[in-house]
Image: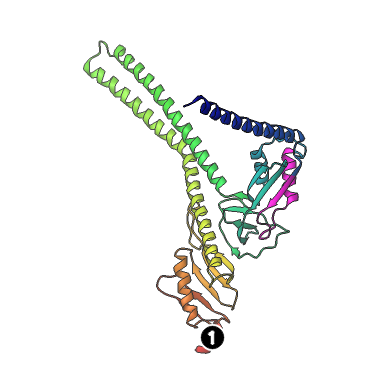
Amino acid sequence: MSWKRFWRISGEVLFWCLVVAFFVWVGFLRTENEDARGVREVRVVVVDQQERNFVNSEIVLGLIEEDMGDLVGRSIEGLNMWEINWAVESYNFVSHSRAYVDYDNVVTIEVHQRRPVVRVLCSDGNDYYLSEDMHILPIHSSAHINLPIITGALPLPVEKGFVGDLAEPLADLEEEIAMLEGEDRARIEQRRVEQQKMREERQKKYKRESKGLSDEEKQKLRNKNREILRQEAENNRIEDAQYRIPIDQKILAKKKYEENYNFLLKLINFVELTEHTPQWQGEFVQFVALESKQRVESHIFREPHFELIPRRGEYTIEFGTLADAERKLQKLSTFLSAGVVDTRGGRVSVEFDGQVVWKAPKSDKKSNK
């Protein structure tokens, strides 16, 4: 390579390095100046405002101010976007949010609302929304949304008035069980160490006491030691059983909670199925949960049966449990299309496999006699 070409390439490299350095320096100065000015504005964008109106700018700004104070004028470097999102997402109706800063020092917060699937009006007076992501939401006075209604004895795994994520109590149960089992393992390990020491001491004691004894006397001493060991084992068994009682109770409660949780998830999927199937969209105005008449143990969850109330007509659909829901809806569709149902009354049952039962109104039964 000639020296002339070498100096030409070196000059070009140096030139572009200076250009890059200049723009980095300008960007640094701009950022430094903007940070010195602080936050110019906080802008809230509710992404799904047209669909639901649970959340608005005033609510979001109030949540931030309550938790962090006023952001306007604050240094950009001192802002924690995670902390802003945490404050906004503490509101039950917020599914998730995303906070970011643009070049004009404007903090923008994009908010996504939770989507209720059904409104539940329980026979015990409990009234709430159940969202698609398994949250219980309180009734919102300013939100007017058209949702299917569930009435009757809908079992809930939480106490009346609970609001929030239904997965949280389950996580709490799992944490309690893990803590109790950890304490139990530590107790058993400590007892094992103590028993080992006692066993060694008894062996030494036996050697001392058995010196000079006859074979018969030695056997009596061994039998006495065996009885002591037997009694210790029995005491340990009783102690272990007592310690297991609260653990087993928590495990049973967790199992029942999981069954109830899975049922509610199945219920949401069923309502979504009816609302997203063109034939059934908006067709069922009410889902009636019927309390099981079969007596079961308190720790066993029993899935309720349902009756569906159609929008058109005065008949009732006996649906049974939510098992095989798609097949039952298909049976119902085939039966209704045959024109057998008198929409002025009566009951249609699709509960049992392989059959659809039409129960005419009582007045029709009398006229047929």
The one of 331 and 40 positioned closer to us in this rendering = 40
Task: Report helix, strand or loop for mark 1.
Answer: helix
Q: Which residue is mark 1?
A: 364
Where residue 191 sits, quadrant-wise, is: top left
- Tell me the amino acid under the disc marked 1: Asp
- Mark count: 1
Where's residue 78, x and y in %?
Answer: 70, 33
Where residue 215 sits, quadrant-wise, is: top left
The one of 347 and 1 positioned closer to us in this rendering = 1
Where residue 51 sits, quadrant-wise, is: bottom right
Where's residue 141, x and y in %?
Answer: 72, 58
The one of 344 and 217 positioned closer to us in this rendering = 344
For residue 36, above or below residue 158: above
Residue span colored magenta: 42-68
Where's residue 294, x and y in %?
Answer: 48, 61
Q: Is residue 352 magenta?
A: no
Viewer can see residue 83 = yes
Q: Residue at 50% across / 79% down in the picture?
A: 336
Taking the image as shown, residue 39 lies to the left or right of residue 233, namely: right
Taking the image as shown, residue 329 lies to the left or right of residue 45, namely: left
Taking the image as shown, residue 142 lies to the left or right of residue 367, namely: right
Viewer can see residue 92 = no
Q: Is residue 63 magenta?
A: yes
For residue 191, above or below residue 282: above
Mark 1 crowd level (few <14, some 14–19, many ≥20, 10 Å Cα): few
For residue 175, above or below residue 273: above
